[in-house]
Image: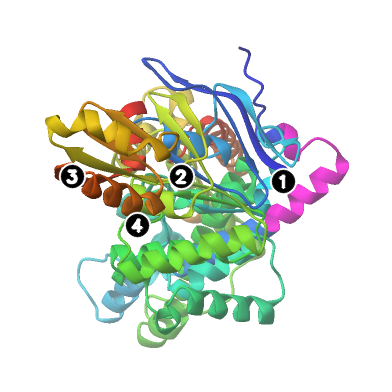
């Protein structure tokens, strides 16, 4: 007997009115997912990234000997931000923490069946998946912005006050801020790619295997910028963080800044689209419960 | 009025037919129990009805609309399948989010509905408690609260009596009956607690290995049996001529279903000097049907 079961897509995306209805459903589900995410205790794990700017500024203020910054290279806010970013990116633990947070949220809901609570009510699994994905991206982005703001606060509140010999509070040029913003954006994308990997594989695998896959991905991305072939290097979001960071420090890179920024965006969008499609496909088709 | 119609529902796994052309209906205000051995396909059937899992074939109509094509009808369903919650949220927050997901927007009425529902299931004192601190029975009660939170036209419950204390069971049974009789909800529930099933259901659908093996009303009947000495068997036929349409005499046993016959039959036998060796009451229970069919 031919299956007469159609996908939820046909039911919720059939015409303009239903598309409008789907938008309303998405807003509602997004709000629900955000509430769930923010009420989890492990959301605080995302703020562990604060350790780096705090430790960096306090240790510099305390004249810690392991930082080699001479008075000749006074650091400004932009340099400090990028310094924090590069250190954090090189210690992939924070990406792994983000992966763990996303996996605990998404995979565990499928594993313990709590995702079933809303499946019959939300009706469209695509909307449910998109709401979860968007809510995760929002929380991770907000956490990174918060960490950046605290980094600036640390710089102006601690370093500029206590170490005027190495830190300067003078304003930076627009171009400097532009490059710094591009670096931070590339850095943010690396986190969002991690979330995409978890969402993509989480629809197929349980929590621990999904996290393991993501950890493998993060380690591979850390190594890829050292790959001999340029095209392989391009696959890693870290390649763009490093390249853009070089420009902030007055160094050059094989690629220009616009190329690096465009590459970063393309890399992010490609990962996002591919992994979303993969994850959504399975989430829509699979039997839950 | 026919509320739910399951038509030739199939769920095939590579090595197993979990459901094979199962069809039945549930009418408005009717309580239908789904029974069967473990692995018979009860939960799969319920999951398929509410689109938690996708059937391989067949159709599920609710008020004439195929739920597998258009899930809008599911908004009228109260569902309790594997009572699950967000453990890290409080009872109140769990119910609040569920109401939001069901489309409720008026915060005041949402608050009132939640507290009313919690009162109904006896959890009003635990509203702010995290669900992870709950016992299994309390979770079952909370599961019931989830199903009753929004106005429903159909209630679907998978093993709702599991883990409930006697008071909880009574509460659940009264809620089910009330929903069917007062609110005219259709109710489909699965259970292994056959005493509870026979107490409240109007009809039974029995599954065995993915097939429907029984679909019909079930009424428990008591059967009374008087055992006589062999020598008395012949004379008892003469003694009980007046009741011959209502009793069965075979070998040395007289059996009948009408409780009112106990006294006159015994009186007649004693007066006729028949020797009664035993008197038994046998209940034709759902267990017998289960053992026979499942």
Can residue B67 be spotted in the picture? yes
Give A152 or B96, whichever is nearer the viewer: B96
Task: Give the letter of the chain under mark 4.
Answer: A
Q: Is residue A148 magenta?
A: no
Q: Which mark is residue B273?
A: 3
| Chain of the residue where label 1 is placed in the rendered structure | B
| Gap between marks 3 and 2 measured at Cα | 36 Å
Q: Is residue A90 above or below residue B254?
A: below
Instruction: Identify the element where label 4 is drawn.
Output: helix
Answer few, some or many: residues within 10 Å of disc 1's Cα (few below 14, many 20 plus, some between 14 and 19): some
**Circle 1 sits on which residue?**
B72
Q: In this rendering, which labeled residue sits more in front, label 1 or label 3?
A: 3
Residue A219 placement, left or right of A198: left
Q: Is residue A251 visible?
A: no
The Cα atoms of the two marked residues, 3 and 4, are separated by: 105 Å
Q: Residue at x 37, y 80 (%)?
A: A165
Direction from residue A144 to residue B67 in the image, left or right: right
Residue B41 numbered mark, or none:
none
- The residue singled out by tag 2 in the image is B219
**Badge 1 or badge 3: first in the primary sequence:** 1
| Mark 4 residue crowding within 10 angstroms, few (<14) / some (14–19) / many (20+) | few
CA–CA distance in space, label 2 to label 4:
75 Å
Residue A243 in percent (x, y) is at 48, 43
Residue range in magenta is: A10-27
């Amino acid at each position: 007997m031919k299956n007469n079961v159609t996908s939820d897509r046909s039911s919720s995306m059939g015409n303009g009115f239903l598309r409008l209805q789907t938008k309303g459903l998405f807003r509602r589900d997004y709000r629900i997912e955000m509430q769930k995410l923010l009420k989890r205790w492990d959301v605080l794990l995302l703020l562990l990234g604060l350790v780096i700017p705090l430790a960096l500024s306090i240790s510099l203020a305390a004249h810690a000997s392991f930082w080699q910054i001479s008075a000749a290279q006074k650091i400004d806010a932009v340099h400090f931000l990028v310094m924090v970013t590069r250190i954090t990116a090189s210690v992939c633990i924070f990406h792994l923490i983000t992966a763990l947070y996303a996996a605990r949220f998404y995979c565990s809901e499928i594993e313990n069946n709590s995702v079933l609570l809303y499946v019959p009510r939300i009706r469209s699994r695509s909307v449910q998946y998109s709401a979860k994905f968007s809510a995760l991206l929002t929380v991770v982005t907000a956490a990174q912005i918060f960490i950046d703001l605290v980094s600036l606060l640390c710089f102006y509140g601690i370093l500029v006050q206590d170490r005027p010999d190495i830190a300067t509070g003078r304003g930076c040029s627009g171009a400097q801020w532009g490059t710094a913003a591009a670096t931070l954006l590339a850095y943010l994308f690396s986190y969002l790619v991690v979330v995409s990997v978890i969402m993509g594989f989480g629809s197929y695998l349980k929590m621990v295997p999904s996290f393991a896959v993501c950890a493998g991905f993060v380690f591979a991305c850390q190594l890829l910028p050292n790959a001999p072939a340029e095209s392989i290097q391009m696959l890693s979001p870290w390649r763009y963080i490093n390249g853009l960071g070089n420009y902030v420090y007055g160094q050059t890179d094989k690629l220009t800044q616009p190329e690096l920024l465009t590459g970063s965006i393309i890399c992010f969008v490609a990962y996002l689209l591919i992994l979303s499609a993969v994850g959504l496909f399975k989430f829509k088709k699979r039997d839950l419960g | 009025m026919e509320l739910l119609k399951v038509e030739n529902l199939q769920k095939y796994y590579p090595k197993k037919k979990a459901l094979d052309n199962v069809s039945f209906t549930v009418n408005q205000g009717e309580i239908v129990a789904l029974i069967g051995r473990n692995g018979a396909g009860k939960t799969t059937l319920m999951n398929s009805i509410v689109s938690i899992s996708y059937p391989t074939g067949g159709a599920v109509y609710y008020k004439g609309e195929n739920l597998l094509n258009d899930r809008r009808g599911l908004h009228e369903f109260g569902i309790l399948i594997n009572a699950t919650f967000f453990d890290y949220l409080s009872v109140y927050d769990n119910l609040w989010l569920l109401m939001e997901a069901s489309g409720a927007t008026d915060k005041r009425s949402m608050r009132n509905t939640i507290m009313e529902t919690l009162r109904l299931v006896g959890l009003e004192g635990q509203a702010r408690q995290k669900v992870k601190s709950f016992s299994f029975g309390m979770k079952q009660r909370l599961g019931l609260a989830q199903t009753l939170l929004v106005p429903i036209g159909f209630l679907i419950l998978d093993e709702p009596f599991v883990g409930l204390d006697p008071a909880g069971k009574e509460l659940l049974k009264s809620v089910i009956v009330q929903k069917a009789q007062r609110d005219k909800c259709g109710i489909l529930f699965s259970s292994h607690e056959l005493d509870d099933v026979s107490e409240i259901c109007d009809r039974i659908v029995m599954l065995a290995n993915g097939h429907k093996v029984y679909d019909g009303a079930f009424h428990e009947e008591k059967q009374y049996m008087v055992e006589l000495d062999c020598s008395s068997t012949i004379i008892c036929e003469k003694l009980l001529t007046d009741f011959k349409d209502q009793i069965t005499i075979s070998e040395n046993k007289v059996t009948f279903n009408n409780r009112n016959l106990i006294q006159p039959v015994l009186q007649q036998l004693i007066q006729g000097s028949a020797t009664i060796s035993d008197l038994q009451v046998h209940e034709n229970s759902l267990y017998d049907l289960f053992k026979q069919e499942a």
